[in-house]
Amino acid sequence: METALRIGSFVLIFALLALWEALRPRRPLTQAKRRRWLTNLALVVTDTLVLRLMGGAVAYAAAVYVQQRGWGWLNAVDWPYWLEFIMVIIALDFALYLQHVMSHYLPVFWRLHKVHHTDLDIDLTTGIRFHPLEIGVSMLYKVGVVTALGADPWAVLIFEVILNGTALFTHSNIDIPEKFDQLLRRVLVTPDMHRVHHSTTPRETNSNFGTFISVWDRLCGTYRQAPALGQLGMEIGLQEYRNPKALNFFSLLLVPFRGQAQGNRDNY
């Protein structure tokens, strides 16, 4: 049931957003869509295999294990279930915000994370463009957070569903009316808000780190309203990776092992 819920929701959201992108795109694409999609889909298949080798739904399994043994903070208190459920969602989202910031500022993690930023266009498949090693590290990080919290398994499962869906949504190339976008981003991360994060300008790349809830960027001073060149004028990707032919699946697997170790903050 857990696997069916995660995969079923992912496929449904992917199909709806792909249709929306086709009917009402926000930006014209600059690269061949077929080549980019093949690369990004190949990465997500590899990432899925890595997670399978790690035991599948690791965070959910960790939550079950922790609950059975009464470990973690929430297992030491007696609060209403609905409150603990909401707290797990919020805490996990903030934990991923912090992880995202570290992925930009710590050289060892930026080596892995920059694979995600090498995409020369941004659409829903950018949301699944991650190096397999980063996926593994991220899962271990989530297991640590889940264990410390004593998170309820169902809350973890629902968060994973939300995480997968919002990864597609926030990267999607969909046109949302500006007034609605501004209203929505008061609480949630929108595509226009997150797209700034994929700008080639480092001060814009190092902003809008939020995954699902948008308030973390405002509270922590990393929020940027819009790119300097506007949504249609901004350039997507990283300055040092501009050759589409060098951004194929196999080349991306080698990106973390090439070049000098530095965080993205050093690109200012």
Image (spheres, grey):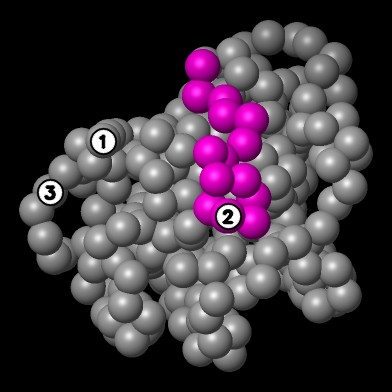
Crowd class of label 2 (few under 14; some 14 to 19; many from 20; radius 10 Å) = few
User: Which segment is the magenta one?
Assistant: 221-234
**Does 253 sit left or right of 158 as displayed?**
left
At x 28% / y 42%, what residue is drawn?
A: 264
Task: Name the residue nearer the viewer: 168 or 84.
Answer: 168
Q: Which mark is residue 186?
A: none
Task: State which mark lies toward you, 3 or 1.
Answer: 1
In the image, residue 225 lies in the stretch drawn in magenta: yes
Task: State which mark lies toward you, 2 or 1.
Answer: 2
Q: Check the picture and name the quadrant holding the N terminus.
A: bottom right
User: What distance separates the C-alpha of mark 3 from that of mark 1?
Assistant: 15 Å
Task: Give the labeled residue for mark 3.
Answer: 261
Task: Give the labeled residue for mark 1.
Answer: 268
Q: Position of residue 112 (x, y in %)?
A: 30, 56
In the image, residue 232 lies in the stretch drawn in magenta: yes
**Does 189 sit left or right of 127 as displayed?**
right
Q: Check the picture and name the quadrant holding the C terminus.
A: top left
The three-letter amino acid code for the residue at tag 3 is Ala
Task: Give the labeled residue for mark 2.
Answer: 233
Element class at badge 1: loop
Q: Earlier in the sequence, mark 3 or mark 1?
A: 3
Crowd class of label 3 (few under 14; some 14 to 19; many from 20; radius 10 Å) = some
